Amino acid sequence: MKILKEGTGEIFCKNTPSEVRKWTRENKPRALIDKRMKIKDAVKKYVKDGDYLAIGGFGHIRIPMAIIYEIVRQRIKNLSVAGHTAVQDIDMLMAGGCVSAVDIAYVVGFELRGLSGVQRRLFESGQVKKTEYTNGAMSYRIRAGAQGVPFIPVKVMLGTDTMMHSPGKVVKCPFTGEKVLLLPSLNPDVCIIHAHRADMYGNVQIDGHIVKDDLQARASKRVIVMCEELISDDVIRQDPGKTVIPFYMVDAVVEQPWGSHPGNMPYKYYFDHKFTEDYLTVGRNKDPKVLEKWLEDWVYSLDSFDDYLVKLGPRRLYNLRDAEFLRKPVGEIKK
Amino acid sequence: MTAENYSLRELMAVVAARQLQDGKSLAVGTGLPLVAAMFAQLTHAPNLVIFFEAGGIAPQLPTLPVSVGDSRTIHKALCTTTLIDIMDSMRRGFIDYAFLGGAQIDRYGNLNSTMIGDDYEKPKVRFPGSGGANDFGSLAWETLIIMDRHSPRRFIEKVDFITTPGFLYGPGAREEEGLSEDTGPSRVITDLCLMDFEPESKRMRLIATHPGITVDDVIKATGFELIIADDVKTTKPPTKEDLRLLHEVIDPNGFVFKK
C-alpha cells in the first residue's frame, strides 16, 4: 500500500495488540476473585515508572483524582499519558513531575476557566514530549487496541498540521480508492477509572455518559477501578446490561467516596470551583515554591485521600452535592 | 423593541443563534457557541438537537455548563453515550452543524487552536490543541465559527498551525485531502461582522456588519484580503427580551457574560 503523506509524530506507547494478547493469556485471571485493595497498594502494584497511562472520565468530570494524588505521592516518574481531554487530572500529574510525554488531543486548557500555568511551562519549554491527535482520533486508536488490530483508518485530521505532527499515514482505501488516514492502535499499560459503583470482582456501573472508559478498559493491560460505592454482585446481576466494564478486565477495585474531587461526579457532586480556581492561581505563579507548598499541603503531607477529605471538611463537600442537584448556585468563575 | 444597551458578546450570541435552523442537529463546545445554541432553542429553534462530545445527547440544559462533559450537559438528556459514538454519528451524517472557535483563522477558514510561534517544539504560547475541534470541522456538514476580538493578528494571512481544516488551500482541497464531501465552514461570526465563504473561491466574504461598524472597519481589522458581498447588510441587535434570556435563563452564573 503506497503511503501518500505521513506525519512525524512519535509513538509513545510501544505495546502492540498481538503482544498484549499473549501477555493477557498469562497475566489476567478469568475467575471471580476478590480484587479489593487500598489505593496505595493498587498504585504500588500496578503503576510503574515509564508506563503509558490512560485516565477515565473527561478531564475534570468523573476523573479518578484519589488515584492521581496517590501517583503523585508515590513520585512515579516518566509516565506517558493519553491526553484525551486532559484537564485537572493531567495537570496534577504534571505538577507532580510524573509525566514525560503526552499524546495530545486536549491539554493546557481548563475549558471556561482558561489556561494552566503548569502545563504551559512544561509544554512551551519542550520539557514534556508531545504528539498531536484529536479526541476522536484517541478514541479510534483505543477502539483499535480493544479490537486487537494494529491500526485503524479514520476520516479526521486529514489535510492539517494536526496530522503532520501525528504518526498518521495517508493511504488510498484498497476497496473504494478513497483517501483515509491510518493511525496506530493504542494499548495502554495501565488505565485508571472512577465509576459510580463496582462489586469486589470488578463489575462496573457508570451513571450517565461513559466518555471512553469502556474502550480504555478493553484496550489496557492493567485496569484500576475506583468507585463511589462498593456493591454486592447480587445488585450487578439484577441488571447486567448496566455493566460497562466486566470483571475479567479489572485488576484492582477501590472504594473511595468523593474520589473525583475537585472534579464533577454526575448525579453525585458538582465541581469544587473554588478549589480549582485556587489551584490554577498557584500553578500560574512564576515562583515554583508556591506550587511546591501546595503539593506539600494537599498531597505529600497527607497519608491518604481520606485525610484530604477531612482537610476539606464536610460542609464544603455537602455544598458540592447541593450544587449538583441545582439546589444552590455553583459559584463564580473568575478569569 | 431593540435594547438600547447591549454588549458585543450579547450581539454575537444572538447573531450566531440566528444561523441555526429549527429541526437540525448541532455539536457544540461550551462558552459563547453554547449560549447561541441555547438561545436558539429558547427562541426560533425549539427542536434543535444538541450533541456534546463527551456523550450527552439532547439534554434539557438548565444553565450554561462549565465543561462539555459536566452534569449540565446530560441534564434530562435522551441518551448518554461515549465520545466515539458522537464522532461516529457525525461521520455517518447525523450532525448538521458544529460550532468552533480558535486563536487564529485564515481566509479559507482554517483554524489554529494549538500554538502561537514558528517552533512547534518550543511555541511562544501553547494552546489546548484540537480537542474535538478537528473532528467536528472534518465530520459535521457545516462548521460555524465564532471569533471575538476581530483583529489582523487573529484574522491572518497564514495561521501558525492548522489545527482544524477549513477549506485548506481552496476549492476542492478538502476532497483532495480525503475529507468528507460537501463539508466545511459556512459562517464566521465576530465582534464586528458576519461572514460566509464565497462558493466559487471558498474565500471568506463579508455579508453583514454589526450596527455602527463600517465595511472599512472590518477590512482594517482583517489581515488578509476579504471578499465584500455586493449587498452588505446590517445585523439586527438583540431585544430586551433577548437580553433577559441570555442573562437570567442561560447564564445566571455569569460564566460568559461577566457580571
Image (spheres, rainbow, N blue to C red):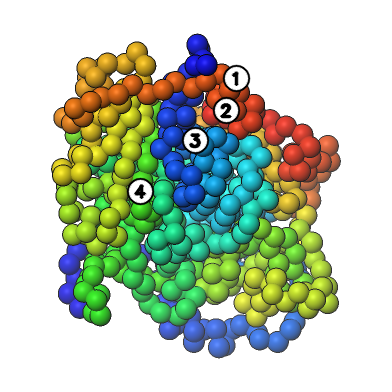
Asked if both marks, 2 and 3, belong to the same chain, the answer given is yes
In the image, residue A29 above or below residue A213: below
Counting from the top left corner in percent of width and height, residue A203 is at: 71, 74
The answer for which chain carries disc 1 is: B
- Distance, label 2 to label 3, CA atoms, is 9 Å
Asked if badges 1 and 4 are on one and the same chain, I answer yes
Q: Which residue is mark 3?
A: B36
Q: Around disc 3, counting alpha carbons within 10 Å, would you say few (fewer than 14), some (14 to 19), or many (20 or more)?
A: many
Where residue B246 is drawn, which disc sits there?
2
Can residue A115 be seen in this snapshot? no
Q: CA distance from mark 1 to mark 3?
A: 18 Å
**In the rendered image, which quarter contains the C terminus of chain B?**
top right
Q: Quadrant of residue B206?
A: top left
Residue B142 disc label: 4
At horizontal 24% and vertical 39% (from top left) the residue drawn is: B197
Coordinates of residue B181 in the picture (x, y in percent): 27, 59
* Mark nearer the viewer, 1 or 3: 3
CA gap, disc 1 and disc 4: 33 Å
